[in-house]
Image (tube, rainbow, N blue to C red):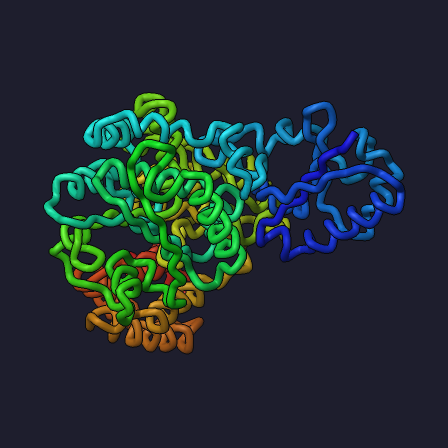
Amino acid sequence: MTQRIFVPRDASAVSVGAERVCRTIENEARNRGLDVEIVRNGSRGLYWLEPLIEVEIDGQRVAYGPVAPEDVPGLFEAGWLRGGAHALFHGPSEEIPYLKRQTRLTFARMGVTDPLSLEDYRAHGGLKGLERALDMKAEDIVDAVDTGGLRGRGGAGFPTGIKWRTVMNADGGQKYIVCNADEGDSGTFSDRMLMEGDPFCLIEGMIIAGLAVGADTGYIYLRSEYPDAWDVLEDAIVTATREGMLGANVLGSGRRFELNLFKGAGAYVCGEETSLLESIEGKRGLVRAKPPLPALQGLFGQPTVVNNVITLASVPWILAHGGEAYKAHGSGRSRGTLPFQLAGNLKRPGLVEVAFGMTLRELLYDFGGGSASGRPIRAVQVGGPLGAYLPESRFDLPLDYEAFAAVGATVGHGGIVAFDDSVDMAKMARYAMEFCAIESCGKCTPCRIGSVRGVELLDSMLAARPQRSNDDTLLRDLCQTMLEGSLCAMGGMTPYPVLSALDHYPEDFGLSPKQEEAST
């Protein structure tokens, strides 16, 4: 009887030796005369255990990890194909506490299925949302998404139903669905994980969006630094077209949806929706002034839905189970789940999909296990390189859009990067300004010039330490100008990490708390 062994093809697992482990397992099984089938699945998201290898025994999968090539002979000797005890044994995969405590809706198939098997996708609940949507009116599809309370998972948190309704009602002979897969924030990897591990989920979500707004053409704008995701998506689109999921006759319905894969230009600012559209049109990635909104005049001047990967991938579950079922998760105006990505100085980095409302402390300690260094966690940046730094006093803040906005922070794309007490927060503030100076598209003065002046001011403050520099007041004034005058979030959010560092860690700038209070 052929026994299945699951070896992740996820880029993070591959980066720590999954390919070599896979070849070693194949060779060892062949040398022992054992009949095994190796399935290349996506990652479960337990990155501290990668490569995490699973063995299917009587329909149940048990996990071993992190497995190195030199561990493989010992695993066979220990009888791992029968669930044998070993130092790398973690028991049934679904019972691992890190996984068991999660609420996996969008990521329900992650690490479970063969990413390129449409049959496997369907067997695990895939296409149910699309099949239901094909029997619904466009406005009913939008209503379901609206009822679910889905908001943009790319960081802006704008209600998806409102955006879709605007495009649905817009006049235009041609409409488009554009997926923003230009995931560039530090500490974020959920988009990449989903595209590599469950690509048909994204494709299904884009088709449903097309049915909702009357669009028959879609584009996935994928960052150039994701070659593995490109290969998986390219193969998935070919398979979906061959099997009738994409093309002129979607699932035999007579409805059309074509999907194009577009490689990004390697610029952080192209993660901003209008800059992204400029890039697809073959132009330099510069931010457009709004209005007009892309929903009315987007790609090639036509009404366009621009959503990120996780937003679109959340849609199939909503259509399959109903908006009310999705709305039952979360808190306040933040409904459903978000795949939070734990990175930085943590013992157990990885992906955690939970409902909104969990606290930062729970994620950092119950899931992340505290700092990898064993030192106290001093600061956490939530929402990418333009997100605010939060001190320990904010760790009990519930993770939802409004709670974070109330303290000048942002949930963003769900990326969480932890720093222990050895971090220099003044240098981190400088990094944020320098990042903006490098990545700015240069179209507006507050971002283009303000970020350069900000770096200069911070250099002056760093040089003056441990004495106080008088530049902190000027730096705050500059940040306010960038907040209020920048054309997009690139310049408009760069002050978040700078101001939060000033507010919560004044001593790192040569300021005492009393001096900092006086300067504000």
Q: Do we see residue 516 in this rendering?
A: no
Residue 230 relative to residue 78: left or right? left
Task: Please identify the quarter of the rendering in which residue 128 is found.
Answer: top left
Of residue 332 and residue 305, the one placed in the foreground of this image is 305
- Where residue 167 appears, as percent x and y from the top left, is 17, 43
Is 185 rendered above or below residue 405? below
Residue 324 lies, with reference to residue 24, above or below; the image says above
Comparing 363 with 45, the one in front is 45
Q: Quadrant of the N terminus?
A: top right
| Residue 329 figure quarter | top left
Residue nearest the observer in this picture, 87 or 193: 193
The image quarter containing residue 504 is bottom left
Q: Position of residue 97 (x, y in %)?
A: 61, 30
The C terminus lies in quadrant: bottom left
Residue at horizontal 30%, vertical 76%? 452
Q: Residue at x 30, y 62 (%)?
A: 280
Q: Residue at x 26, y 58 (%)?
A: 489
Q: Horizontally, is 378 left or right of 497 in the view?
A: right
